[in-house]
């Protein structure tokens, strides 16, 4: 379901020469002997997820769908990026599926927060608050506003039926609140970190409320598990991709630009940036993950990619079959001179733009390009893609001898912020 093409990447080393180190990294990952091994629960998740909780999750999501216009998903980082990526990738940008999903608790922007609160005041609302501890400041601030709003709008008893908490199974501020108020709760697994959590209730509950077939996501996840359990670089495209990243870094390419030609993949790129940036950016190591959506960003970033400093390589994340397509119409007068495209598929135009850009960046610009091709933007493909990137990320980090699953640098800004806010 996901293929890797390295023919345009200017690799100066043989991928196969990395087989021994990749096999060692694979064994460390699967045997839980590598760095951060307390957080590798996602590796076996396709086989070992809690089936009973998953069935309850689907039932609660169906109930929320019936009675709400809007689901407020209150979380930040891995607590929202994966779900938003899935909803936009699978449903598209202007889906007629209800309820509307609004992502909240991921910013301190007072204007955004105030406008959202005003927007939902006359709508039927449910809330999914997502936090392991319940003390993440952006999320806690937003949830207090939402909790008071819901209780004023519906009363405490009905509000409690409309608030779902995804949190720690036994402890933490949010767990305490949820137990006291009687909220439905789902568990964030202890051994799966936030940026790997979209395949758990963290992502699956809001995705299910959005009307997406989560069974198909789990099918894609399981298929990727089977396809990617062999460390052989001739068979494992995720591991080969991980090796390519290291080879290109050795060639002085410190920036990876993930490029899509589908607007509804924009949030997938944002999710991917957290996955790789927070996992790999340690000990002064790693590539800087950035992204672009072409052809749109060719009119802003294209000049730099083509002619700028040669610090980056592109990873094209291409879609074989679009969700929807249409034919370009003929016009009798042809005043715009566009009749040469009459009868052509718009997706064909998009693919020709991709082909022409690849040729320009590779042959004239000298920019290495890796190409990842995904079958489509279905729920099954989303599940497959997530597991593909999880495994690639873990292996590429182990190759750098770093822990892929912690984020010590993130704590520095929090300490400074709390001091300035006057938190004791």
Image (spheres, rainbow, N blue to C red):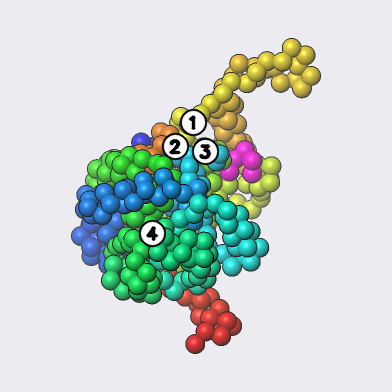
| Inter-mark Cα distance, 2 to 1 | 7 Å
Residue 285 vs residue 270, the one in the foreground: 270
The answer to whether one can see residue 249 in this image is: no
Q: Is residue 39 magenta?
A: no
At horizontal 46% and vertical 29% (from top left) the residue drawn is 321
Q: Dot 3 corresponds to which residue?
A: 95
Which residue is tagged 2? 377
Q: Nearer the viewer, mark 2 or mark 3?
A: 3
Residue assigned mark 4: 161
Q: Which residue is mark 1?
A: 322
Q: Position of residue 327 (x, y in %)?
A: 59, 20
Task: State how far apart marks 2 and 3 are (Cα).
Answer: 14 Å
For the image, the number of numbered tags is: 4
* Residue neighbourhood size for the residue with mark 1, other residues' Cα within 10 Å, grouped as few (<14), some (14–19), many (≥20): few
Image location (x, y in percent) of residue 153:
52, 61
Disc 2: CA contacts within 10 A as few (<14), some (14-19) or many (>=20): many
The answer to which image quadrant residue 246 occupies is bottom left
Residue at the image position 24 percent from the left and 46 percent from the top: 230
Label 2 vs 4, first from the N-terminus: 4
Quarter of the image for the N terminus: give it.
Answer: top left
Tell me the magenta residue range.
293-297
Q: In the drawing, does residue 30 fall left or right of residue 424?
A: left
- How far apart marks 4 and 1 lie (CA) works out to 38 Å
N-term mark: 2 or 3: 3
Q: Position of residue 275 (x, y in %)?
A: 43, 57
- Along the line of sight, the residue nearer the viewer: 175 or 351: 175
């Amino acid at each position: 379901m996901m293929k890797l093409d390295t023919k345009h990447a200017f690799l100066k080393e043989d991928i196969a020469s990395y087989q021994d180190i990749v096999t060692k990294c694979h064994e460390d990952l699967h045997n839980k002997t590598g760095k951060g091994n307390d957080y590798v629960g996602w590796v076996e998740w396709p086989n070992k997820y809690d089936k009973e909780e998953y069935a309850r999750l689907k039932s609660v999501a169906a109930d929320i769908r019936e009675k709400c216009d809007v689901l407020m998903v209150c979380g930040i980082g891995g607590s929202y990026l994966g779900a938003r990526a899935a909803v936009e990738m699978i449903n598209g940008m202007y889906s007629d599926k209800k309820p509307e999903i609004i992502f909240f608790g991921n910013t301190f922007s007072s204007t955004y927060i105030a406008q959202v609160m005003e927007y939902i005041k006359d709508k039927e609302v449910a809330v999914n608050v997502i936090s392991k501890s319940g003390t993440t400041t952006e999320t806690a601030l937003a949830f207090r506003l939402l909790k008071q709003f819901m209780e004023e709008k519906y009363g405490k008893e009905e509000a409690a039926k409309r608030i779902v908490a995804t949190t720690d199974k036994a402890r933490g501020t949010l767990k305490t609140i949820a137990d006291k108020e009687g909220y439905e709760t789902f568990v964030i697994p202890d051994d799966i970190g936030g940026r790997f959590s979209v395949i758990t209730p963290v992502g699956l509950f809001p995705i299910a409320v959005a009307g997406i077939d989560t069974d198909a996501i789990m099918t894609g996840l399981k298929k990727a598990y089977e396809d990617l359990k062999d460390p052989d670089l001739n068979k494992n495209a995720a591991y080969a991709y991980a090796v390519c990243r290291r080879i290109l870094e050795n060639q002085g390419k410190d920036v990876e630009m993930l490029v899509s030609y589908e607007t509804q993949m924009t949030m997938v790129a944002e999710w991917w940036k957290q996955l790789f940036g927070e996992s790999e950016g340690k000990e002064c190591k790693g590539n800087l993950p950035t992204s672009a959506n072409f052809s749109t960003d060719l009119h802003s970033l294209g000049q730099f990619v083509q002619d700028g400093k040669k610090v980056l390589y592109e990873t094209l994340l291409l879609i074989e079959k679009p969700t929807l397509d249409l034919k370009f119409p003929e016009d009798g007068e042809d005043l715009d001179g566009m009749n040469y495209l009459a009868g052509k598929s718009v997706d064909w135009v998009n693919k020709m733009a991709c082909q022409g850009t690849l040729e320009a960046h590779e042959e004239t610009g000298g920019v290495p390009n890796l190409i990842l091709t995904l079958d489509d933007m279905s729920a099954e493909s989303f599940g497959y893609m997530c597991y593909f990137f999880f495994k690639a990320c873990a292996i590429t980090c182990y190759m750098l001898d770093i822990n892929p699953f912690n984020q010590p640098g993130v704590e520095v800004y929090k300490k400074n912020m709390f001091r300035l806010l006057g938190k004791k």
